[in-house]
Image (cartoon, rainbow, N blue to C red):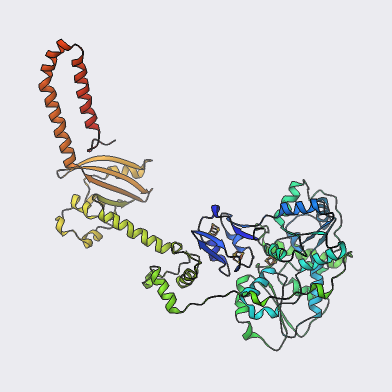
Amino acid sequence: MKPAIYTEQAACQDCYKCVRECPVKAIEVKDGHAVVVQDLCLYCGHCVTVCPVGAKRMREDLPRAKLLLARRESCHISIAPSWVSEFACSPGQMAAALLALGFRSAGETSIGAEVVSSAIRRSFSSSLSLSTACPAVTELVEKYYPRLASHLSPWKSPMLAHALMLKQRYGDKAGIVFAGPCIAKKQEGDKHEECVDVVLTFDELRRWFDDAGIDLRSIEPASFDGMASRGGSLYPVDGGMIASIKEKAQIIDATMISLSGTESIMRSLDDLGEQASGRPLFLEFLACKGGCINGPATDKKRSLVSKRLRVIETAARRSEEGEAASSLAPVGDEKLSKRWQADRGVDRRHFSSEEIESALIRLGKERKEDRLNCGGCGYHTCADFAAAWIEGKAEKAMCVASMRRIAQKKMNAIIKAIPLGVVIVDDEMNVVECNRKFLEFFSDFPPEEIDEVIIDNMVGRPAARFLPETEGIRRIQGGERELVEKRLEYRGRIMKVLIFIIERDRFTGVLFEDVTSLTKRRDTVIKNAEAVIAKNLATVQQIAGLLGESAAETEIILSSLIDVFKSSGGGGEGR
Ligand code: SF4
Ligand code: SF4
Ligand code: SF4
């Protein structure tokens, strides 16, 4: 099975936005493509959200869900409570739509959330507790903060809790599908196949409704298998878990803080040891800013405020209407408990300043001014890029500034070495670049005096100061054509001129080839051939009497030979 997140390499445009945005730099560039390093990834799905061309993808699981439904006698679906901010329908209509797909029962995952909240209340730690409803945060702590893994709450997530309740009620052979806004849950489901068979995103569920021709707005309402209380329904928003824990018991002597967004969470975890006080501290962490309502598989067109409002209003209504009883019994602590893995820690290599310096030099960044820290490579600083390069996660070509410098150097070397006169002009007809040969052709400097300083000093000067006419350049700049060839006679030289667009409305290049000797040689040959024809024509005409039409043919052949010679190579008139 494919991992939950992968790169469609053919679609990747090497923009490195995913590298820049990945909070743990779990993306390496190999052969020009940005691929996810599964051992480092949190499955937060942020790279999928930010990739501008859809090359970062989440695994498609809809066919597996359909197959499960076709093969298993009894299938049940758990839908994340954030559905209220994604689908415009009532709970009864959503329940009816899920049942219409063929599920035996449909319930909200918030029922599992209530069981988790209740377990946390019973086991409240006297020191530090880190919440675990978000699998991306669990991955973050286990992989990047293994020293804190023992503080992760010892209970499974609401998705797994609800799945276990369904298995307990309908038997181990029952098929369980979860639908939500999250990619990390796909990965969590893969690790807990004994609980959940298939994890779908809301996008996949939406497509399933479309395939089945189900219209959410017009379907006759049915009932979910039980309804969670206000607290359970608030889990998808930042602070919702704490509200749920506090709903049924006041934990007075504890500090409870909620925080969302992976980078903010990492900053808090970095200095957590220093902040620890004697008071119990419960931290509710959600990887997506604002919570699951902003998960990677949610509608990004709607504002977080309106999504949050939908969740809060739904929770308030449930509080007034009261909970509908569920046929599911809570699972015991033994099944609900989870052991945290402190041995998954990622070996984050640290490099000495000497190692970084040496890498920067090898990357062509000897000088301070070459270290732009522009972020174009996907890393915040040139030093971070150098560290990633030593680790084998980055490639030299990722540094746009270096690549541009190398390209410039190559172009300069070519312009210098080419045996043609070269000038590049801007839209105001000022010189941007020229070479020695150009100045030899058009300036008054004695050739032996032309050096690098003189050539550099030409930049910014009007091209008209050197060129006898600039009309051809103006015409190509204002017209449609990309290339024009002409002939120019100047100071005793015959030149073949090639004018071409480098960047329309900005830069135009002109090449001058001295074809004087070639042209003169050709003219001499033509003149000699014409003399031979004239001299021998009389004789040929006499013989023509004897040979009939062949004289005329001879003249035609000789004349056409001259025409061919005139029009081939050696610099004819401009085409
Ligand atoms: S964001 Fe990443 S995967 Fe997407 S095109 Fe850019 S480099 Fe490729
Ligand atoms: S899913 Fe998250 S952690 Fe993994 S590569 Fe993408 S942005 Fe990075
Ligand atoms: S915040 Fe919610 S949607 Fe986002 S990664 Fe965590 S569980 Fe998934």
> In the image, is residue 422 above or below residue 379?
above
* Residue 434 visible within the image: no
Question: What is the x, y in percent for residue 189?
Answer: 72, 64
Which image quarter is the C terminus in? top left
Q: Which quadrant holds residue 110?
A: bottom right
Question: What is the x, y in percent for residue 362?
Answer: 39, 70
* Residue 378 visible within the image: yes
User: For this view, does 78 lie left or right of residue 284?
Assistant: right
Q: Compare residues 520 and 432 and report the one nearer the observer.
A: 520
User: For this view, does 198 lie left or right of residue 352?
Assistant: right
Question: What is the x, y in percent for residue 303?
Answer: 67, 61
Tell me the quadrant of ligand 3.
Answer: bottom right
User: For this view, does 542 lie left or right of residue 28?
Assistant: left
Q: Identify the residue at horizontal 66%, vertical 80% (top origin).
A: 148
Q: Identify the residue at horizontal 66%, vertical 71% (top origin).
A: 139
Q: Residue furthest bottom?
A: 278
Which image quarter is the N terminus in? bottom right
> In the image, is residue 66 above or below residue 343?
above
Q: Which quadrant holds residue 571?
A: top left
Q: Compare residues 322 and 452 and report the one nearer the observer.
A: 452
Q: Identify the residue at horizontal 20%, vertical 60% (top origin).
A: 451
User: For this view, does 528 lie left or right of residue 326?
Assistant: left
Question: What is the x, y in percent for residue 182?
Answer: 69, 62
Q: How many marks?
A: 0
Q: Compare residues 317 and 203 and report the one nearer the observer.
A: 203
